[in-house]
Amino acid sequence: ASLADQPAFDKAAFEAMIPERHRAFVEEVLERYRVPKLPAGESPYEGLLAWTHAGARSQVEIALAHPIRLLVNALGTPPRDVIDQVHARGVQVAALCGSVEHARRHVEAGVDIIVAQGSEAGGHTGEIGTMVLIPDVVDAVAPRPVLAAGGIGCGRQIAAALALGAEGAWMGSVWLATTESDLHPVAMTKVLQATSRDTVRSRSMTGKPARQLRTRWTEAWDDPASPGPLPMPLQFLLNADATTRIHRYAHLETSGAKELVGTPIGQIVGRMSRVRPVRELVHEMMTEFVDAVARVHALLEE
Amino acid sequence: ASLADQPAFDKAAFEAMIPERHRAFVEEVLERYRVPKLPAGESPYEGLLAWTHAGARSQVEIALAHPIRLLVNALGTPPRDVIDQVHARGVQVAALCGSVEHARRHVEAGVDIIVAQGSEAGGHTGEIGTMVLIPDVVDAVAPRPVLAAGGIGCGRQIAAALALGAEGAWMGSVWLATTESDLHPVAMTKVLQATSRDTVRSRSMTGKPARQLRTRWTEAWDDPASPGPLPMPLQFLLNADATTRIHRYAHLETSGAKELVGTPIGQIVGRMSRVRPVRELVHEMMTEFVDAVARVHALLEE
């Protein structure tokens, strides 16, 4: 079991595991881009998200205190006792996967719905493309239902996902460019201008490969001068202060912080060129989906 | 213009550009895997494929001497004068691309059919997944027809390609595991056993990123001890002798040559688990295609 599996393992112990060389590298990058320090008394964003068992289990408790129908795990197979606890409350469990092996492990643990996520996706993602992954996973876990994720943001892509054998589509990135989104304004500007080539799978954010906008931050960690990202959850912890400073000072004319602002996002960022209400986006997706299905079906009748 | 653009530039001049360090590295890998030298008088596979303008233009001449309908370029935009020459013979021109920028360049040069190839593909391929690339390219070059490539090897994937807006599917890897294939027997055994995770985009074969089976050869070039692949066409030329020796001695019990045998192939290698006649494969694809389209269309009627 890794250190993150030990509920009693606290933040100070993780902090102590971060090499001085890594702290110095982060500070050097921030200085190079003239990112000021936080004002006295202001704290960086804290927390290890759900990347320790203690953190994840407390989030499950919070989720189950609400009238939910589905609980979804993004990274790894949920522990069997957590799945049993969730099932006992009449709630279904889904989990993301990037390979057939991950999908089989989810099914063995009792996961109800598999979300197969191709390499095109934003955030933590593997190397197998959606086109290949979906039929592979559908065949491996049948009759367990599979949702397709990765590179899905328009109606034609939803139709393709269903043609591949998925029961539905799971979308993330596309909601970032909506009026309902709380994305940082500087990141939003970058998202609206980015093409499908402007993302990169990088360990610089969390320690595991996650697709995100390519920025001077991801480039700095790819540079030969970089000490290399730390394993999860240390990399995220190492970045906490830097991330807060970068976002806080991105608007400052005298700072290069804006060069460092990024966001997890998938390759469909290239289709996202204006901010729209979710309602409008969904309506357009559904119209395009129906058109795509009708167009392909018409080929059968020719 | 690069050296490869100069028709008069001959093989000896390319040979002279290969650093001694790279020759020594190749020989060291071959010795480590106990790959014998070629018998006296036997020559390695020669030629630079079509990676010089002189070579490519002579291949166009040969192609046009046959009663063909379509000529397809795999790497880069064909020169405008070649396209004009082909068109003058009533033959259409297609070209592969991995991004919207490539597709636009093809259209400007006069290419008739764009083959948009996602990252899942075997051989030279980019980083954008098929699910994202196809609608991007279709929208960028409409009404020019687009064929979808990358990760297509079964009927559901053909249906998905058409749903994404392609006029058809372009398949390569899937034909390798057929009775009609001339794939090296050791590579065939590896192909039948490989999963979708067993490929890698590597510059070790040609100098440009090409998806292929992960082998001890691709790993050797990823190793910190590697001098790094040379630019195209030097890397392929550097490998000529090694490739011939590896394939020739792959069956030798005393040699580790079999560990080094690979083949360009896409991520659908995971679906290729037995050798079948092309006729049977196509029939199965068509049946699955019709089923997939009918299944998705039935959702509209619910």
Image (cartoon, coloured by chain):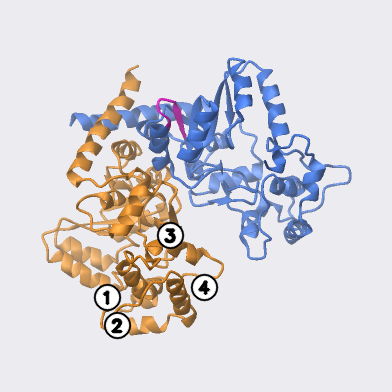
Chain colours: A orange, B blue
- Mark 2 vs mark 3: give the one in front: 3
Residue A103 shown left or right of residue B221 in the figure: left
Judge whether residue A209 can be spotted in this image: yes
Look at the image and give the residue range highlighted in magenta. B141-148
Sequence-wise first label, 2 or 4: 2
**What residue sits right under mark 3 in the picture?**
A215
Q: Is residue B9 above or below residue A3?
A: above
Sequence-wise first label, 2 or 3: 2
Q: Is residue A141 above or below residue B111?
A: below
The one of A93 and A217 positioned closer to us in this rendering: A217
**What residue sits right under mark 1 in the picture?**
A54
**What residue sits right under mark 4 in the picture?**
A227
The one of A243 and A298 positioned closer to us in this rendering: A243
Q: Could you classify mark 3 by the number of other residues whose Cα lies within 10 Å: few (under 14), some (14-19), or many (20 or more)? A: some
Chain of the residue that carries numbered disc 3 in the rendered image: A
Are labels 3 and 1 assigned to the same chain? yes
